[in-house]
Amino acid sequence: MAEVKKPKIEITDGALIPGKDSDAVFSAWRISFFGALSLIILLPIITPDPYRRIIAFLPDGILRTFEVTIFSIFFAFFLGLITGLGRISRIKIINRIATIYVEVIRGIPLLVQIFYIYYALGRFLKIPDIASAVIAMAVCYGAYLGEIFRAGIQSIPKGQMEAALALGMSRSQALRRIILPQTIRLVLPPVGNEFIALLKDSSLVSIIAVSDLLRRGREFASRTFDYFETYTMVALIYLVITLFLSRLVAIMEERLQKGER
Amino acid sequence: MKDRVRVIDATKYFDKVLALRNVNITVRTGEVVLVIGPSGSGKSTLLRCVNRLENLNKGKIWIDEDEVTKPKADIRKIREEVGMVFQSFNLFPHLTALQNITLAPRIVKKNPEKQAREKARALLNRVGLIEKADSYPGQLSGGQQQRVAIARALAMDPRVMLFDEPTSALDPEMIKEVLDVMLDLAREGMTMLVVSHEMGFAKAAANKVVFMDNGEVIESADPETLFNRPQKERTKRFLAHIL
Ligand SMILES: Nc1ncnc2c1ncn2[C@@H]1O[C@H](COP(=O)(O)OP(=O)(O)O)[C@@H](O)[C@H]1O
Ligand SMILES: [Mg+2]
């Protein structure tokens, strides 16, 4: 018991976490990332028509995708934190509410949730499309993040809470000062991966008139009938962004492990 | 000398499992009482009831004039005044040694930062680790971690210190450095309730040794008597086993 074992949570429904082969020059990540990047740069040079027009048309959509993603992440993070705390709460009613939220949300496809908020609830109160998108994404990912936070909190050794209580701290002081700081470090990589998954899922909101990257592509393609070229470009852009972010998460994870004390 | 800790008829169940049965133990001010006994005999539970990490089903515990076990007792106040040292140290890994020690005085006792730091430095000095003030627990050996944990508990100026097998997670070469700190504490008059099977410490510091088995106190006496002339058969068997 002299060595305190470091708990670790593995969640891999987001982007691929680069494995051991990532050290190699021709790692899967490098090939995919730089391959996609080169195509994005080279295609408009080699075949200006229609790639140049596509490339000119999409940036608004990329910004919108980032906008929806960042707002959703922001709210999902806090919702997730509150849910995670609710799931470990000793107060029965809070615990129950948090659990029901997680169960219900995880049981409904995200696309249905988006429709539900935009169209179904939209009948009673007019929610702007971007707000609908952000609400749907945040509510959905809040539930998933809640489970990550719960698992993170629960994987902190019981002795930490006990030592804090034994020093006279209240439970909330102990949570804030002792448990949560350790939890955040622990869950950063899986939370990062959820963010990447969220960015990809944000393409679903293109269906409710949010002009994100995918929607812009659709608009372009339906006007010019350049379906193949447009969707190739859209896919490459998603791929580059996602791979870039997954790399960031991997680096962060490595840092955290190295700096682990 | 006055009684610092009085455990009276303490009984504790975990569901159906009996952990303590009518346990009576007194620790006088400045005394060191050692609790020994086989694994599962209720030693940890006893300590954990003194600072209300667990609640008794029956019986009472007093610290000086304060009844720890009464339903309206101020549990946080009790825990402030009872230091606890765990087998697995339980230092906070995201804080430096110094921060581990200053945190509770700052946020529980509301001591000013500067005062808390000065005190923490003095305590680190006392446990021989002043040069490790800015190290994180992961950078310290087990023995060093446990010494920081002792300093952390002392920073709250406890009326009594509880030690739950403080050296049993340590490699043999580190046991002495921790026991030395505990011996110093004992000499300076700290009231201590210690679960440990370190015979050297028992002989050097303990005023009284209590042998527990199956949640009961089987017998208690001064160390010389209990180790050399135990009265009960169960005590003899246990001592034969560990000596
Ligand atoms: N949190 C708990 N839940 C259920 N049973 C427990 C718990 N803690 C201790 N026990 C039981 O109480 C008895 C005494 O345990 P403990 O006080 O840890 O003994 P010791 O410290 O002497 O090894 C054991 O039978 C143990 O299994
Ligand atoms: Mg024990």
Image: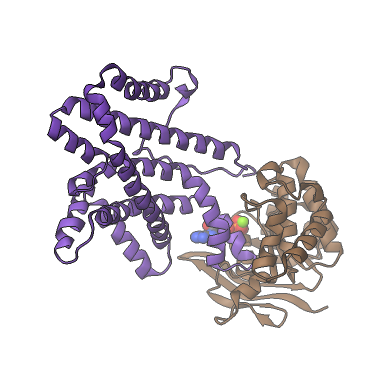
A155 or A107: nearer the eye?
A107
Residue depicted at x 43% and y 52%: A149
Nearest the eye: B125 or B14: B125
Q: Is residue B129 left or right of residue A162?
A: right
A32 to B5, vertically: above or below:
above
Task: Compare residues A28 and B242 and report the one nearer the observer.
Answer: A28
**Ligand 2 quarter of the rendering:** bottom right
Look at the image and tell me whether residue B195 can be seen.
Answer: no
Q: Colour of chain A?
A: purple
Name the side, left or right, on which B99 lies relative to A252. right
Residue B138: percent from the left, percent from the top? 66, 43
Q: Position of residue A261 (x, y in %)?
A: 63, 43
For the question of whether residue A87 can be seen, the reply is yes
> In the rendering, what colour is chain B?
brown
**B91 relative to B119 in the view: left or right:** left
Question: Which image quadrant is residue B34 in?
Answer: bottom right
Q: Considering depth in this image, is B21 or A207 the residue closer to the camera?
A: A207
Find residue B115 and report its horizontal and vertical position in percent: 77, 66
| x and y, in percent, of residue A223 in the image | 13, 34
Q: Residue A81 sits in which quadrant?
A: bottom left
Q: Is residue B66 left or right of residue A35?
A: right
Query: Residue at image x 68%, y 71%?
Result: B109
